[in-house]
Amino acid sequence: MRPVRFLCAEAYAVPPFRIFFVFAALDAVAVIAPWFPKLLGYAESDVAGVPLAVWHRDELLLGMMPAVLAGFVLTALPRWTRRAPESARVVIALAGLWLAGRVAHVVAAETVHGSALAPASAFLFIAALSLIAARQVIAGRAWREIKVVLLLAAFAAATGFQSLYPAAAESEIAMRLGLASVLALVVVLGGRIVPALTAAWLETRGQAAAQVRGNWFEPPAAVAVICALLSWAVAPEAEISALASGLACFAQAGRLARWQGWRAVRSAPILALHVGYGWIPAGFGLHAAAVFWPSAVSQAAAVHAWGIGAIGLMSIAVMASMIRRHARTPFAVSVSLLLSLACAALAAPARIVAEATVDSRHAWLLVSACSWIAAFALFLFAFRKLLLRPSGISK
């Protein structure tokens, strides 16, 4: 048997993240761009027969986030499992499947069958990614990564369930289960990436890093998140769900504090990882507040804290980190990247403020929308050479 070569020429001629991170950033713009005619007062039309609120929710969960996960998982798993990377044919086939799903979303008619096309296509894509990840994990006996496989499978199941009931009340539960699966992946992967990169940055400055692995705090924090996300997905307005979210808020805030992000405040990319992860406990706190004080806090505030704050900011920070690592410039920072991270950090609080105001709601919505689009456009500009040029990343 020939030895495994992690940087084989065939697979890394086009690293998976170069394809999928470009897809993710472009789709992130498509999440919000259709809102501008309405926000500017020119039109209130739907997009391809889909209400705007449903459109940007579906694009985030069924388009952008699967692309981020595919780019990250397909690139990171070979190193985690000590297996050869997937062939270029597999990567290109997955990319074609993702594109087919986005086309299906755009051409979906205003019918039950048409609205099932996007989640059905996303199901096929995420299920395929889950099977690829499972094969890598089982073949490499990397059982530590099995939780990533299980959460990907849960995400696929949620999108599949939504495709079966596209116009029923069950569709909303399926979407919440899908978001819960993605948030759980952010918790799992963030719990590995954030402290590791923080420690690496501190060590480059000759500082001792905090030891956070193997601590008794991790299992109860994980249980708290699982209970809170499941109860929120099934019964978001129940008091027991709010209590679970309150417990998860404190558990995840404590977990984040143990990573000592304040010690890396001089590194904007590292700080962005901590701020992005901080929206996880913030979302739980907002959900608990929305149940007990619905007149002051809306359920949408928690969803936007997770969707824009945790998913949006963490996606940019993690994608940027992976690109820089493969370019062998792990802590390099450009002005355009700083601006991208700043815009991403602004988008979530602006959107939450819009939920809490009446007179200035429209203005804050515009701020949030512009910040989100600018964040991903600047991300593409910052890494245009590394992502779009054939010689951008060396082997």
Image: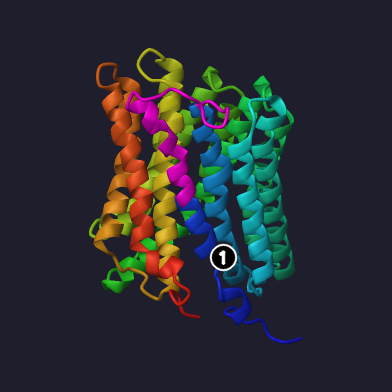
**What residue do we see at 64% from left, 38% from top?**
118
Query: Residue 276, image x and y in percent?
Result: 38, 46
How far from the left and from the top, in percent, is residue 393?
A: 45, 75
Q: Residue under label 1, please give it.
A: 16
Q: Which residues are magenta?
A: 26-51
**Does the magenta run of residues contain 38?**
yes
User: Which residue is depicted at the point 62% across and 51% down?
Assistant: 98
**Compared with residue 308, is residue 244 higher up or lower down, i.e. above or below?**
above
Task: Tell me where residue 323 appears, x and y as whole percent.
Answer: 43, 66
Q: Give the residue at x 49% y 28%.
A: 52
Q: Can residue 113 be seen by looking at this rendering? A: yes
Q: Which residue reaches farthest top?
A: 295
Q: Is residue 165 magenta?
A: no
Relative placement, left or right, of 343 versus 7 is left
Which of the pair 195/379 is nearer the observer? 379
229 to 12, vertically: above or below:
above
